[in-house]
Amino acid sequence: MQQGTGSVNMPLYEKVQPLSAEQFLIILVIYVLILAISYYVIDVIEKTKVKKLHKPKFLYLKTSFLNKYIDKLFEIPIIEKYIKRISYKLSYFNSYDARVNYRNALLLTIVIMFVSLGMFITLVVMFKASIWYLYLLYIVVIVLVIYIVLNFYGEMKELKMAKQLPEALNDLKIAYDNRKRLKLAILESYDDMPKDIRREFARLAEADNLEESLLFLRNRVKNEWFKIVLTLMLLAVQKGDKEGALSDQLQNLNGIIAQEILIKESNRLLFQLYKAFVLGSPLFAFFLRNNMMSMSTEVAKKYESISAANALSGVFIFCIISYFVLDTTEKI
């Protein structure tokens, strides 16, 4: 079909260039590498600053210029919630104080914004700008994939911590009976705890502000029994425990927790599998499209059309909505 300058006729299939599955995976790997390197650099800088001040490695730097900006940002509820959620994910990879992870979350957010903008501009320049919205969705899906993977990793870590909680509570109770002070009991007992939960109690042991660190951990974990334990510890810090009630409470809870945790966490694992399926759906759509395009030239033309790009966008949007519906349902 021939088109003149003033013609309004359009071809049945306007050829466009959506990413292939291989191109999408390459961009995803590049994105992950950039974020991993950025986190490593931020982590090295953090450790270097701490060494220069001769402070314990878990102690956050009160003098950091970012702290005042974080406090200002925390005045906006949506931003506060976002930064804290990212910092919760980062805390599975380290034993830093809450404030350190707040700063790392803010810095990584800035990196994500610049990398996303750079990749979006690169894709629009390399391919046809007529489907710029599809390239924007590519970036959204890539960020969402990384977030879900981190979330899934965190869920698995928390599942292991929940299973280790009874043993950790037993160690903590024995130390608390000897020391009569929570901070000293944590310092004495955490080194003998199982690996995953030991990291969390190490964060508490080395925290500059035990109350803030307990709040950080309580807000992060989803297991209700773990939250109850942390609430009891928090009350002991805030109001004192002159009669040693915390020791009896830990002992009473320990017998209940072991069985209840396994039941609750098995349901959460099921939700994670559902979310993993939703996560894999866009990749499945990519590979399906590639296989279909190899069948014939006519099929390839249809899959390179604007209508096919719109359909692929619909799949992305449906998967994004499905993920957040599952995530919200899990919390009910």
Image: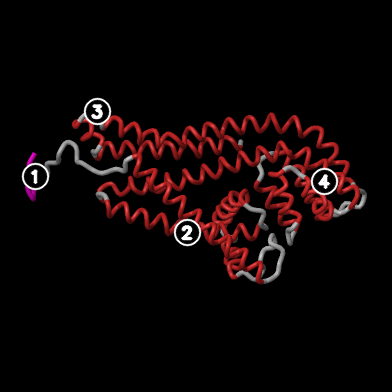
The kind of secondary structure element at disc 3 is loop
Marker disc for residue 3? 1
Image quadrant in which you'd find residue 171: top right
Question: Is 185 covered by the magenta stretch?
Answer: no
Q: Which residues are magenta?
A: 1-7
Q: CA distance from mark 2 to mark 4?
A: 40 Å
Q: Is residue 270 left or right of residue 292?
A: right
The image shows residue 316, relative to residue 218, as above or below, that is above
The kind of secondary structure element at disc 4 is helix
| Mark 3: few/some/many CA within 10 Å (<14, 14-19, 20+) | few
Residue 323: % across, % down: 49, 38
* For marks 3 and 2 on the same chain, the one whose residue lies earlier in the sequence: 2
4 or 1: mark nearer the eye: 4
The kind of secondary structure element at disc 2 is helix
1 or 2: mark nearer the eye: 2
Residue on which the image places disc 2? 111
Please state which amino acid type lies under the numbered disc 1.
Answer: Gln
Dots 4, 1 in contact, CB < 8 A: no
Please state which amino acid type lies under the numbered disc 4.
Answer: Leu
Q: CA distance from mark 4 to mark 1?
A: 79 Å
| Residue 277 visible in rendering | yes
Dots 4, 3 in contact, CB < 8 A: no
Residue on which the image places disc 4? 172
Image quadrant in which you'd find residue 261: top right
Residue 203: % across, % down: 71, 54
Q: CA distance from mark 3 to mark 2?
A: 41 Å
Residue on which the image places disc 3? 295
Foreground residue, 332 or 294? 294
